[in-house]
Image (spheres, rainbow, N blue to C red):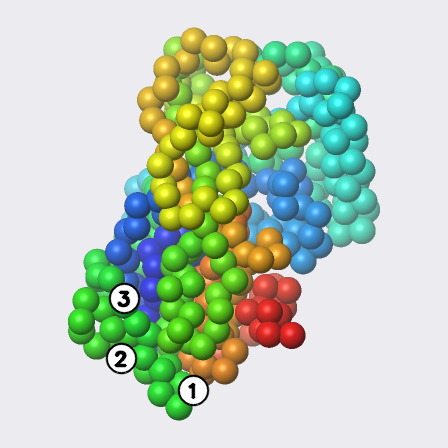
Amino acid sequence: MEAIVVGGGIVGSATAYHLAWAGVDVTLFDRADEGRATDAGAGILSPATSSNADSEPWFRFAVDAVDYYDELNAALLDAGVEETGYAVPGLLRIAVDEAEARIFDEALSRIRDRQERLGAPARIDELAPAEARERSPIVGEVTRALWNPNGGRVDGRTFNAALREAAERAGLTVREADVTGIRVESGTVEGVVADGERFDADAVVVAGGAWSPEFAGDLDYEVPVEPMRGQILHLETDHGTDGWPIVTGTRSLYTVPWEAGRIAVGATYEEGSGYVPHSTVEGVHEVLSDTLDVLPGLADAAIEEIRVGLRPGSADGLPVCGPVPGVEGAYLATGHGPTGLQMGPYSGKQVARLVRGEPLETSMDAFSPARFED
């Protein structure tokens, strides 16, 4: 079998990785678009505390997706990859005033309901404010706090490179080229055109993130995805951040600590941003304002870098993963919005199973592209 994956972000690389290790002759086309979401995302792995957690199908899939990280990380290391950027430092969610405490209570009620019905998440503890401040010395006033000991984080750039390296060892071919068309004949995919050259394949997976709609005409399917800009600041501090937990608030604020004093803070969620991957005064101000309200201990931090990602947001907020209606051998793997790093590797695994005609490990019915045909 020959397969082509279009798009080299976390979802595309994961799809290619799983196809390659299953023995499929697979080629990954990557034009490395500026503003690719994988390269900018903070990579928080905590479905129970995610802003997307209102959707039951999303939650069930996300729990399995995050559980899969340990297995996949071990497989990458066994394949000889030296660094993956994956760790589980725990996650602290806090409310800083009474208005936020009401939102906090709603989230806690949802978490407890799912623990009772689904057994997931296995553990979420409510902490006293003093305990919360002990876990993160940069936190300011705390009214309420939750602790997820299984909260993880992943560096998107590093993990994506790890997937690519391991996949190439299994036979993946990577081409840095621009796919300008998908070839379809009599309702069956035949391959792609890239930089003016024809490439044949039995299956084509479009994992182009926010750029996936470029192939709507070839597939006769309006891909319901558009770019949603996110701005994230990377700060340098004098703190010893090794082992610090992730901190999130009831707003869109999050902070993700890395080694050697580096902390990522974000993020904006800008619908209608278009394909404009640059930072803005308004966006940076929003992030910094929220950061200082919750984490005054970062007031003296240096701004090292501002990353901007164009997340692929779908029309209903859920991923768009599965066979393209009416085109045999064509698949979509996009639309993960701000949770691509959380769900991407597992989504890639499931899409790879679809390509090979194998049953899915977790239902993706709610993510099917066919849902927009009704």
- Above or below, 359 against 334 in this view is below
Per the rendering, the mark at residue 199 is none
Percent of width and height locating residue 334: 47, 59
Sequence-wise, the earlier of marks 2 and 1 is: 1
Sequence-wise, the earlier of marks 3 and 1 is: 3
For the residue marked with disc 2, what is the amino acid? Asp
Q: Quadrant of the C terminus?
A: bottom right
Residue that numbered label 3 is attached to = 179
Residue that numbered label 2 is attached to = 200
Percent of width and height locating residue 249: 63, 27
Observer-nearest of 362 and 251: 251
Q: Is residue 370 left or right of residue 78?
A: right
Q: CA distance from mark 3 to mark 1?
A: 20 Å
Residue that numbered label 1 is attached to = 187
For the residue marked with disc 3, what is the amino acid? Val
**In percent of the image, x 81 and y 44: which residue is there?**
113
Q: Which label lies toward us, 2 or 3?
A: 3
Asked whether disc 2 touches disc 3, contact meaning CB atoms under 8 Å apart, the reply is no
**In percent of the image, x 42 and y 26: which residue is there?**
281
Q: Residues within 10 Å of mark 2 (few under 14, many from 20)?
A: some
**In percent of the image, x 62 and y 41: which residue is there?**
50
Observer-nearest of 83 and 370: 370
For the residue marked with disc 1, what is the amino acid? Gly
